[in-house]
Image (spheres, rainbow, N blue to C red):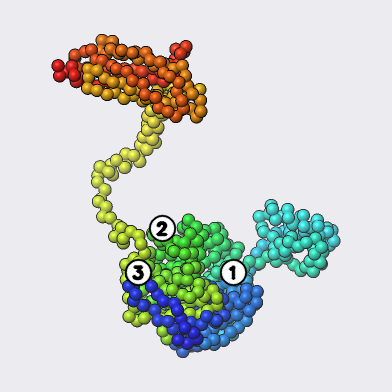
Amino acid sequence: KPAGSLTGTDHCPAEKHIRKWLDAHYDPVAGLYTFSSCVDLADLSGDGESRLVVGDLGSGLSGMKLKVFQGTALLSESTLLDLPTGLVAFFMDLHEPRIPAVAVASGPCIYVYKNLRPYFKFTLPGLEVNPVEQDVWQQVKEGQIDPLTMKEMLEGIRKKADVPLSVRSLRFLSLETDEMDEFVQLHKQQPIKRQTVITCVGTLKKSTADEDGVSCLVIGTESSNVYVLDPEAFIILSKMSLPAPPTMIDVTGQFDVEFRITVACRNGNIYILRRDSDKPKYSMELSSHPVGLVRVGKNVVVGCTDESLQGFTQKKLWRTTLPAPIITMAAMDLPTRGFQGVLVGLANCEVHLYRDKNLLSNIKTPDVVTSICFGRYGREDGTLIMTTKGGGLMVKILKRTAIFDDRDGTPGPPLAQSVRLNVPKKTKLYVDQTLRERENGVAMHRAFYMDLSRMRLAAAKAYVKALESSLTPMSSSLSEPLKMNAVVQGLGPTFKLTLNMQNTAACRPVMNLAISFLYDENLYRMRTPYLRIPLLVPGLIYPVETLVECTSDKGISDIIKVFVLHEGKGCPLLTAHINMPVSEGLMLN
């Protein structure tokens, strides 16, 4: 193994320990700090061997470079003036030999390299400057106002104006009082400019879908715009606007025929732009912010911050949960085998390969992967190139004998669960009922609510009546909260009636209570129709027993009403109705 040994292996429950990847190269001290958007593979010499082109972020403040690797060696490097936000290789003309150019997005500019040399620089058009802001700088230039007054005016503009302040004014507002005068003297003679920056970049075929066809550049900006640039004159062919700044972009189709631009924006939504409109026609709302966007065929696969991977067309198709947060994502396209999948780099030092929601491969890595690129490298078609958080470079090659099984290697419901059911056709009765509901929907809704309102009114009246007449087995009195239930035992003609009384107060006892029974004297006879209840301690259940004798031999029964009263008051505290059973003893006689 050149340049160090590799400890990363691939494991997956569906693989059964069959290795699918060859460990070609691992250099843990390559010094590459980049993301997937700044990595590409291209044949930069026209000799049939693809090179690795990387926009290196350096330390973040210095050391930004454009690096080209051939095999395991660094072929060339060029200094970049600012941090790269995106890098793509594209064909900008039809000249022979067919050698692609490299476009690097950095700040508000696109730097185009041809034959690894600077070729052209495109700068985004300036944005509208707030006229009130211009007037404030003109006044300070003429000495009409001092810096402190200027600061107050700019703060007022920032709070109320529709057009944002320029970078110069925002920087001025962040200064200390003793630094303002020097800043004003340095910049007051220069005109005010408001410039946006590039957030993402992609390529769009111009007129043909050939692999070496001429491509346009597609640029997303911080000002929530998407530009399509001509590949030769570098003029703006089309401008489209979005509700929020784009962060990731994926492009398919041809500019002269039909194209679709899928954009993930900072507001957490996915938007789709078409050729015939300058604003998005479709949008997909996500449950959390996207961190990765890959198009696989007609589907869009999105990785989110809630550790989930989701599939969309114009609606959500599936969702799978991942074991760790997503760091980066990339497409895996292998035309020779007709295979398309999604590579997902996770924070737990793993790289997962998915086709739809099925986990096909799990690659263990020695460090967290920050960028992934799959394609032809050198003369090998199935090459997986990864960079790590510590600056390492890792190269793996897909075995020619590797077979990916569609079985889902993750726990969860079986694949058969997602098979669409054979739903029977709609019957004539169903169609007629649907038409009736559609034509008389308003009247049916009103009739339903009328019946519902009447039912609610009847229930409320019955509830109020029960409370007013104490017809409930629970007392509504706050001073004497009581609860009672009754149990009838026996076959007859003599029954044992047990009343279980409970004081539900927190700490206050209840006293001076009595129980009275109301019944049909032609059917029943009670030895003690009036009972006194002892003091009720909170929380305890007190059983009160009495005997009831059935005097009728007709085999009928009736209700016995039980009233719990407070001595000296005519209104009962609570009431219970006891449905007495039929006396079986008299029936047997």
In the displayed structure, 248 sits above or below 34; it is above
Measure the alpha-carbon separation of dots 2 and 1. 29 Å
Query: Which mark sits nearer the N-terminus, 2 or 3?
Result: 3
Whether residue 364 is visible to the viewer of this picture, yes or no, is yes
Query: Which mark sits nearer the N-terminus, 2 or 1?
Result: 1
Farthest-out residue, right: 143
Question: Viewer-nearest of labels 2 and 3?
Answer: 3
Q: Describe the element under mark 2 as helix, strand or loop.
A: strand
Q: What residue does disc 3 label?
A: 13
- Residue 514, percent across and down? 41, 16
Measure the alpha-carbon separation of dots 3 and 1. 42 Å
Q: What residue does disc 2 label?
A: 316
Q: Which mark is residue 198?
A: 1
Q: Amino acid at mark 1?
A: Ile
Q: Amino acid at mark 3?
A: Pro
- Residue 458, percent across and down? 39, 24
